[in-house]
Image: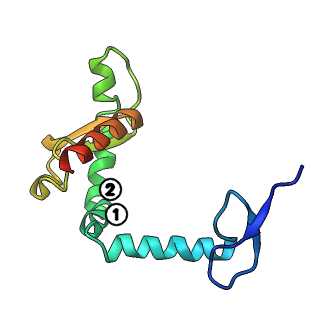
Amino acid sequence: MSVPMKQCNHAGCRTLVPFNERYCVKHKQELNKYRYNKRMYNSNESKYQQFYKSTAWRRLSRRFLENNPICVKCYEDGVIRKADVVDHVQEVKDNWSRRLDESNLQALCNSHHNTKTRNERKKRE
């Protein structure tokens, strides 16, 4: 059975795309490039996004994960799981001055990091 098709959502484009997608390949790339540039350079988050791409942060986080390979929250629960992410205890948005302070970092698995980030966003709002 074939998938229903529709036109690309980009104005003037008549390329047919599967019904569950919004843009054709050409316009999907343009949209992604636009969103990336807006987020990196023109938004309130640009300062933070550029920090996370900085050499200083990449070196610090890589070294921290090498020294702390186990998720802190899983270890507290009695489970040993590999840490995937270096997380700021006090978020960068809340305390910019502690962004490169190793005492403000913790190693977390993706699951615990996503939960913590979601809770912090709710508090901030």
> Which residue occupies 32% across, 56% down?
58
Inter-mark Cα distance, 1 to 2: 7 Å
Q: Which three-letter amino acid code belongs to the residue tagged 1?
A: Lys
Give the mark count. Answer: 2
- Looking at the picture, the colour scheme in use is rainbow
Q: Would residue 20 be found to the left or right of residue 63 on screen?
A: right
For residue 103, above or below residue 98: above
Task: Pinpoint residue 113: horizontal percent, then vertical percent.
Answer: 33, 38
Residue at the image point whose x is 33% and y is 29% from the top: 71
**What residue is shown at x 34% (from left), y 33% (from top)?**
112
Q: Are marks 1 and 2 in contact (CB under 8 Å)?
A: yes
Closer to the chain start, of discs 1 and 2, is 1
Residue at 90% in and 49% down: 1
Q: Which residue is mark 1?
A: 53
| Location of mark 2 (residue) | 58
Q: Quadrant of residue 117?
A: top left
Which image quadrant for residue 118? top left
In this rendering, is residue 61 above or below 79? below
Q: Position of residue 21 (x, y in %)?
A: 66, 61
Image-based side of 36 in relation to 4, left or right: left
Check disc 1 and report its element: helix, strand or loop: loop
**Residue situated in front as seen by the camera: 54 or 89:** 89
